[in-house]
Image (spheres, rainbow, N blue to C red):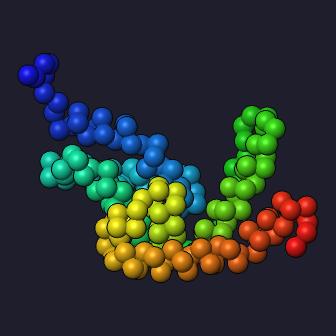
Amino acid sequence: MHIGPALTAEDDFTAFASAYWSRLVRTAYMLTGDFHEAEDLVQTTLIKVYARWDRVRREDAGAYVRRALVNNNRSRHRRRRVVHLLTPLLPDRPQRSGEAERLEERNVLMEALAELPERQRAVVVLRYWEDLGEDEVARTLGCTPGTVKSQASRALAKLRAHPALTSHDRADLGGAA
């Protein structure tokens, strides 16, 4: 039994984009390291997806858009092989207890992520930030689960050895190394 008017494709897309916006921006931020670039990447991705929305299966829409987001980031990376320096965001409000430490931890992590090769960074973001399984990451990136495992292993080894993360860990231990 159907009650009320059917959603138009535009209404359906608008509802999808509204529901997924925050999550897509967070994922794009982890991929780009810059909030403004992340928003631009999500907007560009949604514009491209909107043009094909009538062909997207609704049950696969989240995975489809996530893959488009990663692919658009790759294209962005290829077009602009410029290294971006990540700078911490300055808060607009007074910091609460512990907030400065969390901000510092995030900045240290973003610095380390920025130095990973593009594919390794995408694997880390999708696998550990988005909490996707190896098979889903492989489908998103268009590779095998074995490639996901090897890229994740290499990326995690680089992150563990990254000077900013190792010195940050030592500072958390009271300077003991």
- Residue furthest toward the left? 1
The answer to whether any part of residue 80 appears in the image is: no
Give x and y (percent) for residue 159: 65, 73
Q: Residue 122 placed where, x, y %?
A: 47, 68
Q: Position of residue 51 (x, y in %)?
A: 21, 51
> Going by the image, does 34 lie left or right of 72?
right
Q: Quadrant of residue 45?
A: bottom left
Report the front residue among 31 and 166.
Answer: 166
Which residue, as the protein is rendered here, is positioned at the far right?
175
Which residue occupies the foreground of this view, 18 or 161? 161
- Residue beneath the point at 19% across and 51% down: 56
Q: In the image, is 69 to the left or to the right of 102?
A: left
Image point (91%, 61%), residue name: 174
Quadrant of the image for the N terminus? top left
Quadrant in which the C terminus appears: bottom right
* Residue 4, position as x, y percentages in the image: 14, 19
Q: Evaluate whether residue 68 shows in this view.
A: yes
